[in-house]
Amino acid sequence: MCGIIGYCGPRIAAPILVEGLKRLEYRGYDSAGIAVAQEGRLNVVKRAGKISNLRSHVPPEMPGIIGIGHTRWATHGEVTDGNAHPHTDRGGKVAIVHNGIIENYQSLKDRLESEGVTFVSETDSEVIAHLIASFYQGDLEQAVKETVGLLKGTYGIVAMHADEPDRLVGARNGSPLVLGVGEDEMFLASDVTAIIAHTRQVIYLEDGEVVSVSHRDYRTTDLRNNHIEKQIDHIGWELEEIEKAGFTHFMEKEIHEQPESIRRATKGRIDLEYATGHLGGLNLTNRELLDINRVKILAAGTSYHAGLVAAYVLEALARIPTTAELASELRYRNPIVERNSLYFAISQSGETADTLYAMREVQRKGGRVLGICNVVGSTIARESDGGVYIHSGPEIAVASTKAFTSQLTAFYLFALIMGRMRDMSHEQGLRFAQDLDSVPGHIETILGTTGKIQDLAKRYARFDNFLFLGRGINYPVALEAALKLKEVSYIHAEGYSAAEIKHGPIALINEETPSFFIVPDDGLRGKVINNMKEVKARQGPVIALAVEGDDEVASIADDTLFVPHTSELMYPFLMTVPTQLFAYYCALERECNVDQPRNLAKSVTVE
Ligand code: G6P
């Protein structure tokens, strides 16, 4: 989704801004631009399309040591050069970049137009530049505060004024903004990846806060000018982690990182003596955990699928009624929040608006919400009542892979804790912990079979429709497999419970609609085999993802991929990885932009 970068310091700004935008590319965008101030003037370059297109239009010697940049993901107005940010006022003195949506922009625009302002874009954001200009009396910070006081909606904003060549002002409400504190230089960004090459000292702004930055210092206040003391956080990860490390795509790299990312998610969190898990951030005593009689999971996209698997595991291990729900739906149906329910907001980015707002709605009703997040310091991580970091390292590809398996890992550990407090014996707990511990090794084995998966993708990528079918705990795996394939290869794919195909989807079966069956050696294997035969009887091509040595499944399917044997609850990890690789290789075959699929954004900060 939209990205912001701002620079104020002794160096030439333009290359720093363009490089920062390049690092924000992964979030998904359709146009980009920069504004740089020099000798009382603003120079703005903005273009629809790739950063490379913007870069080719930025003059090589573009002067100016202060500037702002933006990658846009269209919400209001088409993808054009003119709708790209930064936006300026009519005097060309104020430039702004904005993430989020200004809900009352139309009435503000009407008012400004009646005062003679001419708008040059179709965006909601442009009103901000004109409003700042209208309030400006030599103090940019004050003009920004007066402006945001009028805005309804969400924003992360950075503003500059040509007459204040050492000042950037940032304001946040609902869209993330972080201040990077360098040596004699300052950065503002929507995402730390944009600035990690320059500084690791960051300050996360909260909603309602404004930061005024010069190259030497910064001041954080609220809208009423009250000073707010902020703490500097240190970013723990390395620049290399957001680079491709020899892989062709981030998606490929991140799929291959899973043995390591799962190990990181379990590190120090398994207590073998008591055969349980240890999650320090839950902020709940054992007595409080014992009182919980219902768990509800809120999430979107891939994280929602992780939630569906998690619900299954928690019910199986701890016998606590658990449901996962799309956060976007929960928020608007006046959810019933009960005293002894525990909520989880699962979000890789920790910024997804649907999940964040649903979480706030539950909290407003007095509910307790724990976060399962990857991005340290993200909004959901900070606003939740406790939680678990999955420590996957930065996930750059838009399609989520390693975060999914680490989200499962975190939740499996929680299920182990809850299970051991209720139904599970020491021995069962130990076995579960050992099985979880063996998952990374099994995934390494699967990653050794990529050649076979690639070969399969070569033969099947030409189809335009796919069904993914699984049962029980692997039903959400089928949903996730279908989502992955459509996200990156644009092949239409549906995930279903294998039992459900006879209630409708079987009407789609013919020679041109392959069915991808997930068939672990669990109690439902026989039923799934019957479903495979039903598809075969109707000339549907069948791919099976089965357990090593399952000759019966292989004899029915047209093509079979194998995973190692494990215990029933661990199959979601093992079954997911081949489907990620299958989606990846299908996308390559179809020459799709794997890491930045069309229309998608990594972190969707609007509803
Ligand atoms: C976007 C991404 C998906 C992701 C979803 C939830 O739609 O494209 O890949 O699963 O957001 O993201 P979150 O950061 O909350 O896990």
Image (tube, rainbow, N blue to C red):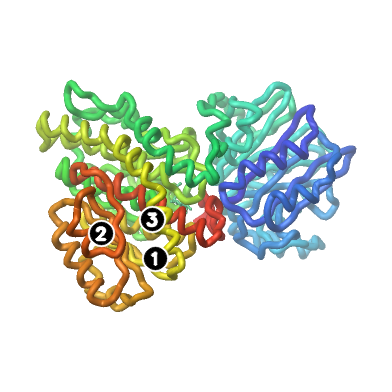
Left or right of residue 295: residue 482: right
Identity, as a three-letter code, of the amino acid under mark 3: Arg
Residue at 30% x, 29% y: name it.
Answer: 279
Identity, as a three-letter code, of the amino acid under mark 2: Gly
Pointers 2 and 1 in contact (C-beta within 8 Å) = no
Q: Which residue is mark 3?
A: 331
Mark pair 3, 1: CA separation: 27 Å
- Residue 391, x across and y down, in percent: 42, 33
The reply to whether residue 220 is visible in this rendering is: no
Residue 176: give its label: none
| Figure check: 104 above or below 252 | below
Mark pair 2, 1: CA separation: 14 Å
Between 130 and 200, the residue placed more toward the observer is 200
**Mark before the other along the chain sequence, 2 or 1:** 2
| Figure check: 91 above or below 406 | below
Residue at 87% x, 43% y: name it.
Answer: 41
**Mark before the other along the chain sequence, 3 or 2:** 3
Residue 212 location, quadrant: top right
- Which callout, 3 or 1, points to the residue nearer the camera? 1
Between 533 and 367, the residue placed more toward the observer is 533
Left or right of residue 434: residue 198: right
Q: Name the residue at the right extreme.
A: 39
Residue 423 location, quadrant: top left
**Mark before the other along the chain sequence, 3 or 1:** 3
Identity, as a three-letter code, of the amino acid under mark 1: Ala
How busy is the neighbourhood of tag 2: few (under 14 within 10 Å), some, or many (20 plus)?
many
Q: Which residue is mark 1?
A: 493
